[in-house]
Amino acid sequence: MKIGVLFAVVALGLQSVAAPDSKSKVFASPNNAFVATIIPVGKDKGLEWYECRIEVRRHDGTLRSAQDFSSSDGDHGYGADLASWTPDSKFFVARMRSSGGHSPMYTPVVFWSRRKNCFYQLNDYTGDMTFSISAPDKVSLSSWPDMKPVTLSLHRLQESQITKLH
């Protein structure tokens, strides 16, 4: 059974602009050098936002990186419900929701690093209870599973705190 997810991206200062096709959400970096696009790829009609693909492109349209969060059955992937660039334009951050309703309290946070040109997932943190972004590259969220508030600086993360996504 799927759990309804609100995909409003105008909260906590996190925002997007609809793409020309009105299906994707487009986020220009604060320095206008990059554009991140969240593309709905869910398999079921009306539930397309339950799974997504995130692309990061240079302002001229050149693809820098992409990450697919879909699953073969439409029940084991992730959709992004909140996303934003960090104010320093070095990271694009998204809070994810499970497409199948499993682990509803665990909402992973993923980010793209401009320096590494790669997507990562934060380990042992969830964006469920708290999620916000502040200057220059800080993310406020909750530790997992004890749900204590924490603020992390993305450029200071240790390898043990992140998992590189493929």
Image (cartoon, rainbow, N blue to C red):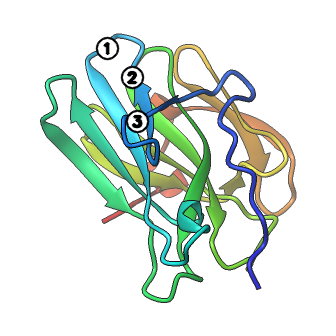
Residue 51: give x, y in percent of width and height: 52, 66
Q: Residue at x 26, y 17 (%)?
A: 33
Secondary structure beneath disc 2? strand
The answer to whether 100 appears left or right of 74 in the picture is right
Secondary structure beneath disc 3? loop
Q: Are marks 1 and 2 in contact (CB under 8 Å)?
A: yes
The residue indicated by pointer 2 is 28
Mark 1 vs mark 2, CA separation in Å: 6 Å
Residue 166: give x, y in percent of width and height: 30, 66
Q: Are marks 3 and 2 in contact (CB under 8 Å)?
A: no
Q: Are marks 3 and 1 in contact (CB under 8 Å)?
A: no
Q: Residue at x 74, y 29 (%)?
A: 11
Report the mark closest to the observer, 3 or 1. 3
Q: Residue at x 74, y 78 (%)?
A: 2
Residue 19 disc label: 3
Report the mark closest to the observer, 3 or 2. 3
The answer to whether 60 appears left or right of 86 in the picture is left
Residue 69: give x, y in percent of width and height: 44, 66
Amino acid on which the number 3 mark rests in the picture: Ala
Q: Quadrant of residue 98?
A: bottom right
The residue indicated by pointer 1 is 32
In this rendered view, identify the residue nearer to me: 11 or 93. Answer: 11
Q: Residue furthest top?
A: 31
Mark 3 vs mark 1, CA separation in Å: 16 Å
